[in-house]
Image (cartoon, rainbow, N blue to C red):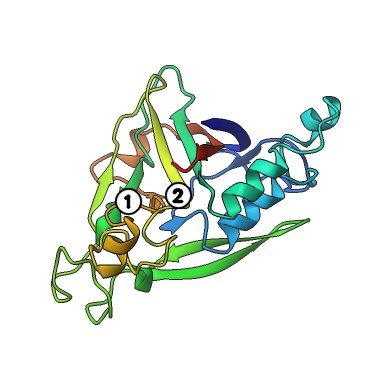
Amino acid sequence: NNANEAGKKSNNNNSNNKSATTATPQVQNPAGLVHADYTKTSAPRRLRDLSNPPKLNDVLRPKLIAENRRSLLDPTMVEEALEGKRRYSFINVWRSIDAENPVKNPPLACIDAATASVDDLRMFKIHYVDRVGENYFVCPPSTSSSSPPSSSSSSERGHSWYYYPDMTMKEALLLKQWDSVGGVACGARSDGAKNDYDVQHGSGWLSTFTIHSAFIDPSICQEESLPRKSIEVRCVVIWEKDI
């Protein structure tokens, strides 16, 4: 597997957002919106972008220029991935950078992929200085959804969540932000649905992305909890052919 750092950001509740025009890691507040980082359009587009010369918003731009490298990723390998000859993923590594205190608020929570449907997704665009990205907002599931996961009836459907309290600097979360062979990426209505399409393509029960959000834990006293300090590094993983 080929893993490459594609970008990174850090979170500190006491910090203001820095300009996106600088080629440095951005300090941001934790994202308190339920979202997925890539869409069916933006994931392959971003992969191709990383095989081209870096733009102003790419944090590795100074390093690539200093090393006289044209791009972060090999263009031939990327083209093979986009043609379906290689599996590819975007995976984030998230961890606390506070050596003394565990993360109290806001912790990170993730939706069980088997309980979400494409009917819950709403695409929104992010306008950078030199490109336009796309993410998904995730809405509460509708009981009238046309394609609920097979694990529950439409009248019972809801999102199941997992969260990770008191994480320390010695712990990390791997968040799969896109998987080219996930159910939704391959055209299924849900990563959790085991329907005819999934059986035919072998994509059932394989998640496409990690829907996630920071949230305020009501069991933690806000006045006594220290601001979260964390860092997130995005990696690109490209498999060998025919895997």
Point 49% across, 32% down: residue: 230
- Three-letter residue code for mark 2: Asp
Examine the image and state in which quarter residue 131 appears: bottom right
Q: Nearer the viewer, residue 188 or 214?
A: 188
Q: Nearer the viewer, residue 170 or 201?
A: 201
Q: In this rendering, does residue 12 appear at all?
A: no
Examine the image and state in which quarter residue 129 appears: bottom right
Q: In this rendering, does residue 101 appear at all?
A: yes
Q: Residue 151, position in %: x, y? A: 15, 63
Q: Nearer the viewer, residue 237 or 119?
A: 237
Mark 1 vs 2, N-terminal side: 2
On the picture, is 85 further left or further right than 107?
A: right
- Three-letter residue code for mark 1: Leu
Q: Is residue 101 above or below residue 139?
A: above
Q: Are marks 1 and 2 in contact (CB under 8 Å)?
A: yes
Point 58% across, 48% down: residue: 81
| Residue wearing tag 1 | 206
Q: In the structure shown, which secondary structural element does the residue marked by tag 2 occupy?
A: strand
Q: In the structure shown, which secondary structural element does the residue marked by tag 1 occupy?
A: loop
Q: Residue 209, position in %: x, y? A: 41, 52
Q: Nearer the viewer, residue 205 or 59?
A: 205
| Residue wearing tag 2 | 179
Q: Which mark is residue 112?
A: none
- How busy is the neighbourhood of tag 1: few (under 14 within 10 Å), some, or many (20 plus)? some
Q: Residue 194, position in %: x, y? A: 23, 62
